[in-house]
Image (cartoon, grey):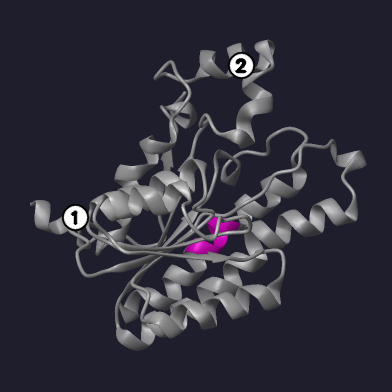
Amino acid sequence: MTALFDLSGRTALVTGARRGIGLAMAEALAVAGADVVGVSARLEPDGSEVERRVRGAGRRFTGFRADLADRAAVRRLAHDVLALGPIDILVNNAGTIIRTPAADHTDDMWDRVIEVNLSGQFVLSREIGRTMTARGHGKIIFTASLLSFQGGVTVPGYAASKSGIAGLTKALANEWAAHGVNVNAIAPGYIATDNTRALRDDPERDRAILARIPAGRWGRPDDLGGVTVFLASAASDYVNGAVIPVDGGWLGR
């Protein structure tokens, strides 16, 4: 059974790998046997935490800096990564959030969030996915959100982008499943990362959120590791177009 989850000989590209959920995903993939190409807009050239953890698992690590808000940079990233060799697993995790009421949410705010969270991810998936379909196998994993199902408060761009990710996941799965490429998404719940610090620092919001989570705690980044390995492995070969919540039971409440 463990062979189903073995990623030995595979190479995974993980965006947003410098910290938080992306860091945990990259480490989990490395522990399962995959070499990792890590991407972040601010990734340190050498000695990053993600590099340390991947190499600590005995796997190879290659790092790239890229701003997913810049489409030309995303296309260059795909070209440079593929020049190193084929990518077997693409984890589209990079994202940004701007918390501003809709009436004050400027065009620039909207454009950046949509570009990073949705458009840039489509461009990268298109470029990498094209090579996967040609080879007849591959795994693409998006990081969706609870706001792929709900509307949220004061995050209109983020909610729209994450709803778009759920739709993009299904659209790509419909086209590429027959070519041996699985496209799925993970919808994290309330995870203790920098993106949720404002919520955790607000005692009223913190209590309200915890009161709705059946598990009774905020999630940790490493809570996403197991489902990432599952969706990257042969264990998920008949899973297509799914958006899997990892939320401590929030949506079931």
Q: Quadrant of residue 195?
A: top right
Of callouts 2 and 1, the N-terminal one: 1
Residue 188 in the image, given as x and y percentages of width and height: 48, 40
> Can residue 228 be spotted in the picture?
no
Distance of label 2 from label 1 (alpha carbons): 36 Å
In the rendered structure, does residue 167 fall within the stretch colored magenta? yes
Foreground of the two, 93 or 189? 93
Q: Is residue 134 left or right of residue 92?
A: left
Which residue reaches farthest bottom? 134
The disc at residue 59 is: none
Residue 17: x %, y % from top left: 49, 53
Q: Badge 1: few (under 14), some or many (20 or more) residues near its Cα, within 10 Å?
A: some
Kindly identify the residue that appears in the image at 71 percent across and 62 percent down.
115
Query: Exactly how many numbered labels are in the figure?
Result: 2
| Disc 2 secondary structure class | helix
* Farthest residue, direction left: 1
Q: Give the residue type that dot 1 points to.
A: Phe
Kindly indicate whether the residue at mark 1 contacts the one at mark 2 (C-beta within 8 angstroms).
no
Relative height, residue 244 to residue 139 (above, below): above
Dividing the picture into quadrants, the one containing residue 161 is bottom right
Identify whether 179 is placed above or below 112.
below
State whether residue 17 is above or below residue 247: below
Residue at numbered disc 2: 206
Q: Residue at x 30, y 77 (%)?
A: 137
Q: Is residue 132 visible?
A: yes
Magenta range:
165-169
- Percent across and percent down for residue 116 are 67, 59
Q: Which secondary structure lies at badge 1? A: helix
Q: Which residue is mark 1?
A: 5
- Left or right position of 62 against 162: left
Residue 27 included in the magenta stretch of the image: no
